[in-house]
Amino acid sequence: MNEYIGKLKSEISKVIIGRDSEVDLMIIALLQGGHILLESVPGTGKTLLAKAFANCLNVEFKRIQFTPDVLPTDVTGIHYFNPKSQEFELKSGPVMTNILLADEINRATPRTQSSLLEAMEERQVTIDGETLSISEPFMVIATQNPVESQQGTFPLPAAQLDRFFMKLSIGFPSFEEEREILRKHLVENGLSKLESVLHPEQLKEMQNEVKHIQVHDDIEKYIILIAKATREHQAIEFGMSPRASLALLRASQGHAFVHGRNFVVPDDVKAVAPNIIKHRIHLTIEASLTKTVDDILADVLNSVSAPVEMEYTK
């Protein structure tokens, strides 16, 4: 494992208990310049996980608490008239940062949600006709609560869901993990004690390394067949887009890198597929009455044969 990744995971584990797989996936998204949607019931540590992750990176971090009255300009920024200088001046919004925590994103109106689209896809924002570039790295970590879908929330449309590199659903901890949480966080959550262990230049170096992780032709074919299977499945209204196929390929590269390999194997694809695909496919009305997205995705992955033997150059 890369020494920087080891340090990052070790530092995060001082605060976050029992979330090793989720931390791995967040690191993969960071390495590939992707955005993350965290979904779970209240109190399972979504915001704490996002904050701990950001605190261990030597980059700028900002947070937006979304509510129905938050406006697009509260996200992107605005030109305001300064009576002292008698000129209009730009006040940039919190989106002009490196790591942006969009807390409870589904509480914002669709208009406000859409203000993030340009930033997430093009790494820029347009304010009154003026386009401003967002410095790298740039990552949006959004959280949402699935149990309040009918209580003053606005579900993210398919176009915006597709902008998220991956979706992580955080479950409840085990008995031992919850006991450790109680003991560790009895006095304080420990965020203030976390150290920045990964600097932008080190991150950039790793991002370049990930791009050169070898992908065999059979792996490419495997990913395309998975995408094709989602598009042709009777229970799926519309399946993976080419953007989703590319995300699956990049996530597989990231998974190989995090696990110390310079080539992708089928198990890498299988490991990240649920987090890349689930939020991008939509079931038909009939299928949604009897099955879950997890059931259908498992059916899709089982229907596609993984490549068996592949040769890689060292």
Image (cartoon, rainbow, N blue to C red):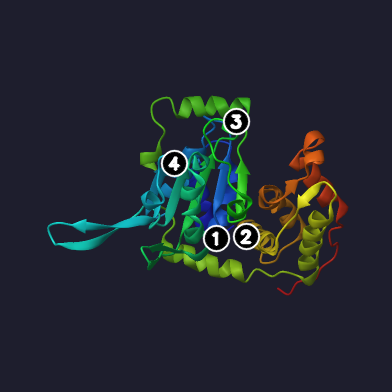
Q: CA distance from mark 4 to mark 3?
A: 17 Å
Question: Spatial distance from mark 3 to mark 2, Cα to Cα?
Answer: 31 Å
Q: Residue lying at the far bottom in this picture: please name it.
A: 313
Q: Which residue is mark 2?
A: 254
Q: Label 4, label 1: how many angstroms apart (C-alpha)?
A: 26 Å
Residue at the (57%, 62%) spot, across then down: 32
Lower position in the chain sequence, tag 3 or tag 1? 1
Which label sits in the foreground, 2 or 4? 4
Q: CA distance from mark 2 to mark 4?
A: 30 Å
| Crowding near the residue tagged with mark 2, few <14, some 14–19, many ≥20 C-alpha atoms within 10 Å | many
Residue flagged by tag 1: what amino acid is it? Leu
SS at mark 1 in the image: helix
Q: Earlier in the sequence, mark 4 or mark 3?
A: 4
Mark 4 neighbour density, 10 Å: few (under 14) some (14–19) many (20 or more): many
Where disc 2 sits, the SS reads helix
Q: Which numbered tag is attached to residue 66?
A: 4
Sequence order check, earlier mark of 2 and 4: 4
Evaluate whether residue 109 shows in this view.
yes
Residue holding disc 1:
31
Are the residues flagged by discs 3 and 2 in contact, CB closer than 8 Å?
Answer: no
Question: Measured along the vertical axis of the image, is residue 207 above or below residue 101?
Answer: below
Q: Which mark is residue 135?
A: none
Mark 4: which amino acid?
Phe
Q: In what element is the residue under mark 3? A: helix
**Left or right for 20, reference 204:** right
N-terminal of the pair, mark 1 or mark 2, is: 1
Q: Which residue occupies 45% across, 62% down?
A: 137
**Label 1 – label 2 distance at C-alpha:** 7 Å
